[in-house]
Image (tube, rainbow, N blue to C red):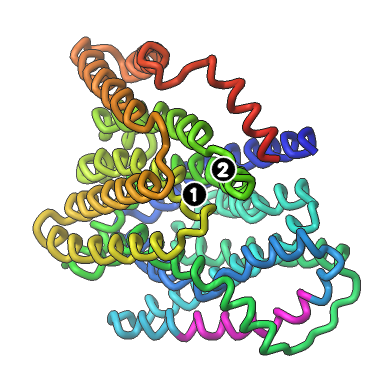
Amino acid sequence: MQRTFLTNLALLLVLNLLVKPFYILGIDAGVQDAVGAEGYGAYAALLSLSFLLNIVLDLGVTNYNTRHIAQHTHLVGRTLGRLAALRFALVGLYALLTVGTGLVLGYSGAQLGMLGWLVVNQALAATLLYLRSFVAGAQRFRQDSLLSVLDRLLLIGAVGWLLWGRSGGTAFRIEWFVWAQTAAYAVSVGVALVLVRRISGPVRLSTRPTFSLVVLRQSFPYALLILLMTLYYRIDTLMLERLLPDGARQAGLYAQGFRFVEALNMLGYLFAGLLLPLFSRMLKQREDVAPLALLAWRLLLAGSLAVAAFGALHAGAVLDLRYSSDTAGAAAPFALLLWCFVAVATTYVFGTLLTAAGDLLLLNVMAAGGALLNIVLNLWLIPLWQVEGAAWASLVTQVGTALVQVVLVQRARPLKGLGRVVLTAGVYGAVLVASAWALRQAGLSLGMQAASFAGVALLAALATGLVDPRRLPQMRTLLQRGR
């Protein structure tokens, strides 16, 4: 079992870390370069709107289904048939709510048409995740790993050709990107459906309102949490586009830096996916979770603080490596968003621990407070400081919610050694900031600065004890015990 777990985990990590960052920083960023900050900003605002109510497409059903099928694999066909009507109803409700919200916000014409396509894309993406839950629940991990990147691989091929493979002709249009997403999701859903049918055998469609209500009742707290956290993670772009006269351009500038942070957050997300079952198993067996939680936090802090310290000081230069225009106005907000990465890395540990412990009421209250705080700060700061105001709102919200989660964990189940990690991380961060500044003053090239800084960061992590090689065998032992 351990060998199977580690093999499939390695496959999942390799596929996701190779494909998805390339898609974000290569294809997605290439689209923005092709259509400009204003054209991409208008799309990004509509995309954020389609994300805000995305949870209505699922309401936690996918998470429920993964657990249910893992325990009752022989019920794949029956479960697929019983939940089909519920899935169609949720898609209809999501489309109605999202398009209605777009009308209330003043979208019309071509903007509303693009929003309609994005609604279709979100519905297809949610269907793909739902079908993957059957594959994962049936322990077909390799197939699930391949499905996790299939849509992005198809998009890399299609949009890459549209951006760089065509010879002359019409300039790239943002609508092509949206339609390519539709095609990629549709093909991926078709492949996933074939795989699920092979597992399930004949599927008999049936309407079971009572069964659907039981599933929704069990899944609702998770769905509410995702909705609230998505709200304060995604609403910045939409508010920029709606609140400012040149909102589309400002949203495009924000997207330049946000894209890098989104790629970085993928590492934390994969980390959280590993921690959740480990924490759940350890809590059920009444084992001490402090060693694993603090070890995971140390590793994430070592990486996130290094990225933030160096990247924030060289924000403009980093953006210039990828974008050909509009980087000057995006540098300051990008520097702030990089520090958000440190807070989000903290959330991936402590929020995951709270989720594993079932403290969803506390998490939902925290997330509701974070969403309200973010909206209020955006309403105040965006008119004052435009895109930089949105970045400050995000930083304050992410730091605030991360600190609340640390406090909640410490009050519920005190982690021995937490204070020492905080102190160590503070010293480590100060060393990194000073080192990055000193290297910049030395007048070295960006590449030489980055290489030197990486060496300094490694030595500082070891010297302060934030990363201790002697603890790595402990991680291996905890992984084996958790599985």
**Total number of numbered labels?**
2
> Residue 158 magenta-drawn?
no
- Most extreme residue toward the right is 201
**Residue 131: mark:** none
Height in image: 274 above or below 67? above
Question: Position of 420 compared to 169: left or right?
Answer: left
Quarter of the picture holding the C terminus: top right
1 and 2 marks in contact (CB < 8 Å): yes
Provide the residue designation for mark 2: 275
**What is the CA distance from the residue labelled 1 to the residue labelled 2?**
7 Å
Boundaries of the magenta span? 79-96
Please report whichever mark, 1 or 2, sits nearer to the chain's N-terminal start: 2
Residue 324 screen position, x and y as percent: 33, 40
> Residue 85 magenta-drawn?
yes
Height in image: 43 above or below 472? below
Q: Nearer the viewer, residue 425 or 126?
A: 425
Residue drawn at x 27%, y 26% is 426
Residue 333 screen position, x and y as percent: 23, 45
Is any atom of residue 442 visible in this view? Answer: yes
Residue 430 screen position, x and y as percent: 24, 22
Q: Nearer the viewer, residue 185 or 360?
A: 360
Residue drawn at x 76%, y 59% is 70
Instruction: Name the kind of residue labelled 2 in the image.
Output: Leu
Provide the residue designation for mark 1: 352
Judged by its main secondary structure, the magenta piece is helix
Residue 461 screen position, x and y as percent: 39, 18
Question: Position of 48 compared to 70: left or right?
Answer: left
